[in-house]
Image (cartoon, rainbow, N blue to C red):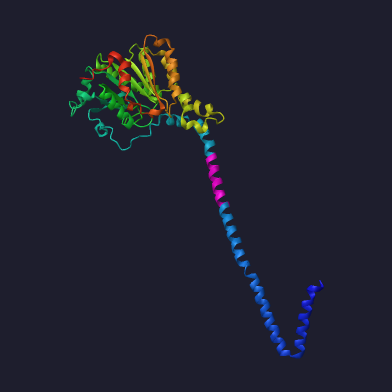
Amino acid sequence: MRKRTEPVALEHESCVALGSSSPGLTASVLDTDCRLKRNLRLAGKAPAEPRCAADAGMKRALGRRKGMWFQLRKILLCILGLYVAIPFLIRLCPGIQAKLIFLNFVRVPYFIDLKKPQDQGLNHTCNYYLQPEEDVTLGVWHTVPAVWWKTAQGKDQMWYEDALASSYPVILYLHGNAGTRGGDHRVELYKVLSSLGYHVVTFDYRGWGDSIGTPSEPGMTYDALHVFDWIKARSGDNPVYIWGHSLGTGVATNLVRRLCERETPPDALILESPFTNIREEAKSHPFSVVYRFFPGFDWFFLDPITNSGIKFANDENVKHISCSLLILHAEDDPVVPFHLGRKLYNIAALSRSFRDFKVQFMPFHSDLGYRHKYIYKSPELPRILREFLGKSEPELQH
């Protein structure tokens, strides 16, 4: 303590000595000394200003981070709320689930005129409109065998209807959900089948494309039955095969079961990418992944489907079908899992109704990349159809 006070005492003594010798000089010295001390104090505070600015910047950055976190938390809470609300919404409004199954409101490709199949490269195709019921109208495409491509140019509907009585077999194609009869992969299949010597008749169910009506499983089945009877009334003794794809396999087995019950079965049934029943398909669909382990999944999502009268029970229908059956399925199908097609085949193969008919399962390896709708690309498809259909295969040299 003594060492610290000594300079202060000396300074005081010097000031007193100066003051006693010359009052004016003392005032000047003191004034100068005070200015020096003030400047030193100010110089000592200078480094503090950047520190204060840095602190303010850190506070602003922290504020921005808190604001971003608050916004992110709000978004996450909204997503969580929507995630929880959707199951209750579907349970309370079963019609939503029906729309998600049919997807008839999804029209792909857009902006095409279904009255002009030639715009899709089908220059040997005619567009019809059939009316199975008073308030229902169906848009239909009829593609003749490719060998008649030139002959078909400029022909009217009557010529196309009469052509069904030719010696070429007919395939009634039942497409899956979403899109229309003018879907890209569907058009490509028509071209392949036409090149193999088949008439191809396809249509949009009520509520799809330019067809008029409200979708339902019974309504779709009745539409298919009406078109089948329309074909048989014009095709004479020519073979008629039914080909269903995806959701269309459900319509196909409904139709063929009904035809077998009235003892007018088709000559063969071909199912491309089929499922066992709509409940198992809905549970296996990629869209259900985020809810598959949600508590009460069946009650929230599957029961409303059944309550809406939608079953598409292929596994039950094949027990009552008596005609040859061919199942085509790609191993890498992301929409209808391959194991459902295999399971359906196993059920059909053990069914007594098929004891006098051929039942065949044709898998396509995942390396081929055919997925859900590109089996038409297979170079093996002509051979598969020829071997399966046997004597009914058209003579391709004509």
In the image, is residue 73 part of the stretch drawn in magenta?
Answer: yes
Locate residue 248: give its quadrant: top left
- Give x and y (percent) for residue 386: 30, 18
In this orientation, which residue lies closer to the viewer: 191 or 133? 191
In the image, is residue 41 part of the stretch drawn in magenta?
Answer: no
Please indicate, yes or no, whether residue 90 appears anywhere in the rendered image.
yes
Which residue sits at x=46%, y=31%? 286
In this orientation, which residue lies closer to the viewer: 388 or 73? 388
Q: Quadrant of the C terminus?
A: top left
Please indicate, yes or no, whether residue 371 appears anywhere in the rendered image.
no
Residue at the extreme front: 3
Which segment is the magenta one?
66-80
Locate residue 50: give its quadrant: bottom right
Residue at the extreme right: 2
- Give x and y (percent) for residue 343: 45, 19
In this orientation, which residue lies closer to the viewer: 168 or 211? 168
Which residue sits at x=22%, y=30%? 123
